[in-house]
Amino acid sequence: MATKEIILNKIQILITNNFKSPEEAFNFFDQDGSGKLSKNEIVKLLKDAEISGFIRGLVATKLIEGYDKDGDELISWEEFKFAIDEITDESK
């Protein structure tokens, strides 16, 4: 199975190569315009980041568990930004 570092690196590459900013990426994947990413929206992000289909659902669940600070099982812009900042710090 892909390690956390590989998965986070693939997400960083996706955002860096396809969007002007993390906020643009967030808005792109927030397909319903709710201001939060649902598990299905996170799975779409993982698919675009070329994460294996077999583990996408599990990875999405783990990302929500790890970054959902308010317990609503969604990822808000603030939570997404925190995750991106952590990914960026780990790549230095």
Image (tube, rainbow, N blue to C red):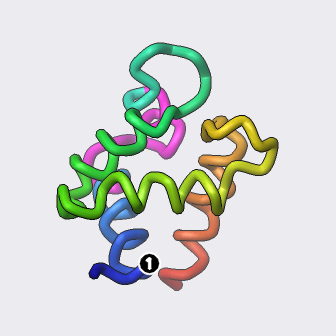
Q: Residue 60 in the image: x percent, y percent?
A: 44, 53
Q: Main secondary structure of the magenta part?
A: helix
Residue drawn at the location 41% of the way across and 61% of the way down: 59
In this view, the residue farthest toward the right is 70
16 with respect to 37 (left or right): left
Task: Return the residue at label 1.
Answer: 4
The N terminus appears in which quarter of the rendering? bottom left
Question: What is the residue that sits farthest to the top in this orientation?
Answer: 33
- Count up the numbered dots: 1
Q: Residue at x 31, y 52 (%)?
A: 46
Q: Is residue 84 above or below residue 74?
A: below
Query: Is 44 on the left-hand or right-hand side of 22?
Result: left
Task: Name the secondary structure under disc 1.
Answer: helix
User: Percent x, y for residue 69?
Assistant: 78, 50
**Which residue is located at x 66 percent, y 56 percent?**
67
How many neighbours does mark 1 have within 10 angstroms: few (below 14), some (14-19), or many (20 or more)?
few
- As for residue 25 lying within the magenta part, the answer is yes
- The answer to which quarter of the image holds residue 75 is top right
Tell me which segment is drawn in magenta.
Answer: 16-27
Above or below residue 31? Residue 9 is below
Comparing 78 with 18, the one in front is 78
Tag 1: amino acid: Lys
Residue 11 at x, y percent in the picture: 36, 60
In which quarter of the view is residue 24 placed? top left
Query: Would residue 73 appear left or right of 71 to someone viewing this image?
Result: left
Residue at x 46% of width, y 39% of height: 39
- Is residue 67 highlighted in magenta? no
x then y, percent, for residue 40: 39, 34
